[in-house]
């Protein structure tokens, strides 16, 4: 007798049969296995390696004076004049050392540098976690050509899940509505597969890890 079933019906029949057949799980321990190799490096070293690999700049500072000295060197190197900082804690810190900056958005279209804090540094992939809860908002980390992030050593964690735990500890049930990970400078390869930095945001990212933020 001729089989009048179509090719589509035959495929669906095979799929239904396969779904009904009980088979052993080929990967019984998949959920318990680690996605990454166990990290043996210090978090500072791992973060610095990963950030550098994606064209970011990592600078470790022992204290506030060390940070200001590095900032003065960068300002001289890049000829920075329009430096913006909107977070009160950072403003107080920079003012203590008489470092010049703009504390409002006056002439913001001419901004060269945005200085912000962050929620966490993720060592596994060299990312910086930011939210919309800070006074810097979103503009300061996106519009200027250079973005400077200042973080404490207590904000350095291994994985993304650890960063989310920091958020939960800090905000409880009031998690920020905007959470973003910055992984190196802005980049795109849309045109002829050629990588271009700074296409949709900062072309330079500097992460300062300050041991004693005072």
Image (tube, helix red, strand yellow):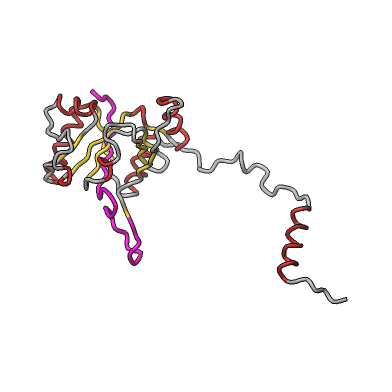
- The residue located at (34%, 67%) in the rendering is 192
The quadrant in which residue 127 appears is: top left
The quadrant in which residue 175 appears is: top left
Q: Nearer the viewer, residue 196 or 32?
A: 196
The quadrant in which residue 158 appears is: top left
- The residue located at (47%, 35%) in the rendering is 161
Q: Which residues are magenta?
A: 188-214
Q: Is residue 129 left or right of residue 112?
A: right
Residue 24 coordinates in the image, percent (x, y)? 74, 48
Q: Nearer the viewer, residue 176 or 163?
A: 176
Q: Nearer the viewer, residue 142 or 118?
A: 142
Q: Quadrant of the N terminus?
A: bottom right
Residue 49 coordinates in the image, percent (x, y)? 35, 43
Q: Quadrant of the C terminus?
A: top left
- The residue located at (28%, 55%) in the rendering is 199
Residue 48 coordinates in the image, percent (x, y)? 33, 40
Kindly give the residue lying farthest to the right in the view shown.
1
Magenta residue check for 194:
yes
Q: Is residue 37 left or right of residue 197?
A: right
Magenta residue check for 31:
no
Kindly give the residue lying farthest to the bottom in the view shown.
2
Residue 27 coordinates in the image, percent (x, y)? 66, 47
Q: Looking at the image, how many numbered discs can be counted on the residues? A: 0
- The residue located at (15%, 26%) in the rendering is 95
Q: Is residue 22 left or right of residue 160?
A: right
Q: Is residue 73 left or right of residue 152?
A: left
Q: Nearer the viewer, residue 147 or 27?
A: 147
């Amino acid at each position: 007798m001729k089989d009048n079933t179509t090719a589509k019906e035959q495929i669906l029949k095979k799929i239904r049969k396969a779904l009904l057949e009980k088979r052993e799980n080929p990967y019984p321990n998949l959920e318990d296995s680690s996605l990454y190799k166990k990290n043996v490096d210090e978090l500072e070293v791992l973060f610095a390696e990963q950030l550098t690999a994606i064209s970011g700049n990592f600078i470790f500072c022992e204290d506030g004076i060390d940070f200001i000295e590095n900032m003065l060197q960068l300002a001289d190197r890049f000829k920075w004049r329009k430096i913006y900082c909107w977070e009160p804690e950072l403003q107080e810190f920079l003012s203590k050392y008489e470092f010049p900056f703009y504390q409002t958005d006056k002439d913001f279209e001419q901004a060269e540098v945005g200085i912000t804090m962050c929620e966490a540094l993720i060592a596994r992939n060299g990312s910086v976690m930011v939210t919309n809860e800070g006074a810097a908002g979103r503009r300061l980390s996106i519009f200027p050509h250079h973005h400077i992030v200042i973080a404490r050593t207590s904000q350095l964690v291994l994985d993304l899940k650890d960063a989310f735990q920091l958020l939960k500890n800090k905000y409880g049930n009031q998690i920020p509505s905007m959470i973003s990970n910055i992984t190196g400078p802005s980049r795109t390869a849309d045109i002829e597969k050629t990588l271009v930095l700074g296409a949709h945001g900062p072309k330079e990212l500097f992460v300062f890890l300050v041991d004693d933020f005072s």
